[in-house]
Amino acid sequence: MAGAGVELVALGDLPMDERDTGDDEQSPIDQVAMTVSTSDDPAVPVWTFRMWTIGLFFCIVLSFVNQFFYYRKEPLTVSALSGQILAVAIGRLMAATLPKTVYRLPLTNFHFTLNPGPFNKKEHVLITVFANSGFAFGNGTSYGVSIVDIIKAFYKRKIYFHAALLLVITTQVLGYGWAGLLRKHLVEPANMWWPANLVQVSLFETLHEKESKKGLSRLKFFLIVLAVSFAYYIIPGYMFTALTSVSWVCWAFPRSVLAQQLGSGLNGLGLGSFALDWSTFQSFLQSPLITPWVPIANVLAGFIIMVYIVIPAFYWTNVYDAKKFPIFSSKLFQGNGTPYNVHKIVNENFEIDMAAYKEQGEVHLSTFFAMAYGLGFASVASVITHIICFHGKEIWQRSRSVLNEKPDIHTRLMKKYPTIPYKWFVVLMFLSIAVAVGTCVGFKHQLQLPWWGVLLACALAIVFTLPIGIITATTNITPGLNVITEYIIGYMLPGKPIANVCFKTYGYISMTQAISFLQDFKLGHYMKVPPRSMFAVQVLGTIVAAVVNVATAWWMLTSVENICDTDKLPADSPWTCPNDSVFYSASVIWGLIGPKRIFGSLGNYSELSWFFLVGALAPVVLWLLTKAFPRARWLSYINLPVILGATSMMPPASAVNYISWTSVGLFFNYFVYTYRRRWWQRYNYVLSAALDAGVAFMGVLLYFALQMNGTSVTWWGNDSHCPLARCPTYPGIVVPGCPVI
């Protein structure tokens, strides 16, 4: 849910012990010592033809595919995992077939070869970093593209292509400069161990170990699943789209508003709904196969509390006039239950028209959307107290040790490689800030953010990068700045929607990108990849991905008629832009109208601000319980920031996404992991990558072969089977297509 929530890297949240062996040949962190190799061969080539070819290929392909699917009703996200696994097969094929001839440039000592020998792990790491750039380092697409989307598709205003391109590139690269200046504090120290990277290290080691001849190889397994996934997706993706969300309750009660509110997987509470479409399992929450069962169980608990306890209690007691609006929607409404006409309150200067706003009245939210913001506030606050209570001592000790500890074995091994001069990062930082300021000043009528707004956003991101970096590097939890940035600029520049989202993106995403940059640097540190190679690939990959994202978005926005406009699109159109719809609503709430008129003293939802206090106190209560009942081990599995933020993706995600995601995730990462661990270790990640790739390839093929020309199949299986789930239940409210109670 845009505008409220925190980014939680789902890998568990258990206390980490340190080694006291005094062994200088191992890391002082147990998990690192058990996972990361302490050997290195500096002669292994990394700047190879294979690395550049495969890396740029996956960067471009993933950027295009993820941006393409971003606009769909179920926006599939293809992670870097697909590229990471496929790169092994392609790299080995190139090593076996490319000529080993050495080419020399005349009159120079420069020489190169297309095939320097066997495909190696260091090349593989750099290819994966390229692929991760195409995956926007976990975000799927460049966050700033959503600004372009809402300007063109929702506000129906103009923005120049070059303005969009500069905006997206600067928001993606901005944080790299100051992140590089913090390497000494967040990358080199052993106590800054970045837990998420150990999964990547383990996967690299697994993919490069010699496979047993017994059983099916990973490559053959990947190709079989890829073929099956590719062939099957034509059914839910085109021929029988109802499989995306099978809501049998709606079929059984086609005229009951209550039954459809309860049973709809897309627009209701999802009771009894399920999916037979991998894109439903994977959309919004990414693949359920790569998240450990403990975080999944916490998400499931949060989902059940929110969807089956909180929402029914608030809706059917008519809190905030809930019955006048749909039970689940990210749209904005007037007090009489009709959609809010945002265009009426936007003047020719792209600012709020107060006279028109007073005439139309206050904005109202659906119960779910309002409570999603409340729980988002609680989640943000809970992260702070959770970290203080459960990780404060550990963070403090490790932060202090950073200043005095001697280099561990991995840092000593990295001393063999030329370091990156600090002036590179200083130049990058000032250059990116200058371009960002120039972009906002040069296109001030389109972006609205003044020069001081860019500098303030950068200052916030710089101040928070070090403490949040320490938190992420030691606990695997990354608090977000989205709510903080929205609040600040919402009060400073009310009435300017695009200024709000630009400030949020420059403040929040530049910090997030800085953390991702440092995390990848630590991965290179563990895998002994030369720092300058990592730097070049990260920066180039980010710029290439941003260009592809913007170009793809521009093409989609100008070629798909009425894209994102659900009122004008055909009922079976996949181009509903659920993520952008929420982003647009957030721009209206926080920017155009402003937090003071929504959550502040002038708003309908001022009571939701108390959720900050609830979220701050909840981890303290849990911490006291763990101290009072030390033998209750199950308490250690409870992660309140995850529980409170579990439904932060709802909307745009729906109940069927969560039901499907948690079911499959628990099955594979608890039952299969527990009882068939060798199978899980060998095939689980490969299965995830193959399913993603098959759906992505067929989805793109369907669009170009059929949907681009308007060819569709009209029958019962492609109809909407829960139309009444969107209906209000308050007496006298008139909405087209809904019965009047």
Image (cartoon, grey):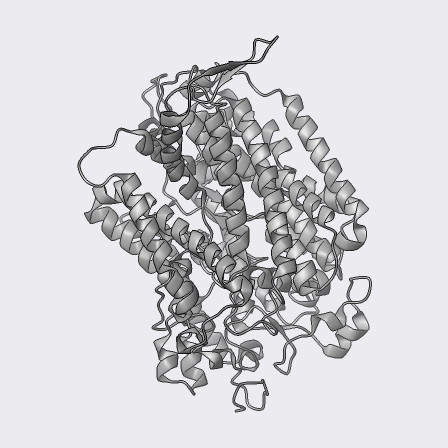
| Nearer the observer, 164 or 458 | 164
User: On the rendered image, what quadrant is the N terminus found in?
Assistant: bottom right
From the top left corner, tell me how far across and down residue 258 is, in percent. Answer: 43, 83
Residue 598 horizontal side relative to residue 133, left or right: right
Q: Quadrant of residue 439?
A: top right
| Nearer the observer, 308 or 75 | 75
Residue 449 horizontal side relative to residue 721, left or right: right
| Image position of 432 with respect to 165: above or below | above
- Residue at image position (43%, 52%) is 697
Q: How many marks?
A: 0
Q: Residue furthest left?
A: 214
From the top left corner, tell me how far across and down residue 572 is, in percent. Answer: 50, 71
From the top left corner, tell me how far across and down residue 216 is, in percent. Answer: 22, 41
| Image position of 327 with respect to 730: above or below | above
Q: Quadrant of residue 545?
A: top right
| Image position of 479 with respect to 429: above or below | below
Whether residue 78 is visible, yes or no, is yes
Whether residue 406 is visible, yes or no, is no
Residue 36 horizontal side relative to residue 518, left or right: left
From the top left corner, tell me how far across and down residue 42 is, in percent. Answer: 43, 15
| Nearer the observer, 710 or 362 | 710
